[in-house]
Image (tube, rainbow, N blue to C red):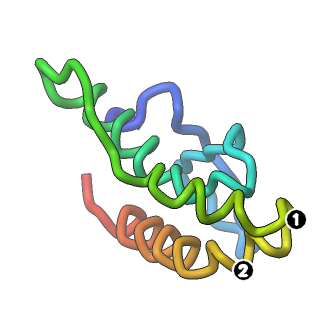
Amino acid sequence: RAFWGEKSELRRFKDARICEAVVWSFVPASRRHHIPAVAAEYALKKNVKNIDSITWTSKVFDDLLSSSNGSFMAVAEHSKHLLQTLDRLARRMKEMKD
């Protein structure tokens, strides 16, 4: 909780475990590839002094994703690998020790 601050909350999972979690629910499915950058920027600004601005390249995928007729399924297909990467990042962050 000290690391994520007010973004962290207690959650109960299907396997009955209760642990701290951070949910980025404000991000629409078509922009989920921005979550690692949003999370990293939040964490850096909260935990590292003297960071004024951060530039990310995750927006380079926006044109590709929006060019696929705008349907959720088309966006989901294009972002499949990005979502898998996000899931791997989430697992690794979960495994981090305080």
Residue found at x 46% / y 75%:
85
**Residue type highlighted by circle 2:** Glu
Please name whichever residue, 35 or 8, is drawn nearer the observer in this view of the structure. Answer: 35
Element carrying mark 1: loop
In primary-sequence order, the first of circles 2 and 1 is 1
How far apart marks 2 and 1 lie (CA) works out to: 10 Å
Element carrying mark 2: helix
Looking at the image, is 24 positioned above or below residue 7? Answer: below
Q: Which residue is mark 1?
A: 71
The residue furthest left is 50
Residue found at x 26% / y 60%:
97
Q: Position of residue 12 (x, y in %)?
A: 71, 57
Please name whichever residue, 57 or 19, is drawn nearer the observer in this view of the structure. Answer: 57
Looking at the image, is 23 positioned above or below residue 15? Answer: above
**Residue type highlighted by circle 1:** Ser
Looking at the image, is 39 positioned above or below residue 72? Answer: above
Do the residues under discs 2 and 1 have CB atoms within 8 angstroms? no
Q: Residues within 10 Å of mark 2 (few under 14, many from 20)?
A: few
Q: Position of residue 96 (x, y in %)?
A: 29, 63
Please name whichever residue, 77 or 60, is drawn nearer the observer in this view of the structure. Answer: 60
Please name whichever residue, 3 or 70, is drawn nearer the observer in this view of the structure. Answer: 70
Q: Position of residue 73 (x, y in %)?
A: 85, 74
Q: Position of residue 4 (x, y in %)?
A: 41, 36
Q: Which residue is mark 2?
A: 77
Q: State the image quarter where residue 62 is shown.
A: bottom right
Residue found at x 35% / y 51%:
57
Left-right relation of 33 to 1: right
Quarter of the figure with the N terminus: top left
Q: Give the total number of marks visible in the rendering.
A: 2
Residue found at x 62% / y 56%:
32
Q: Residues within 10 Å of mark 1 (few under 14, many from 20)?
A: few
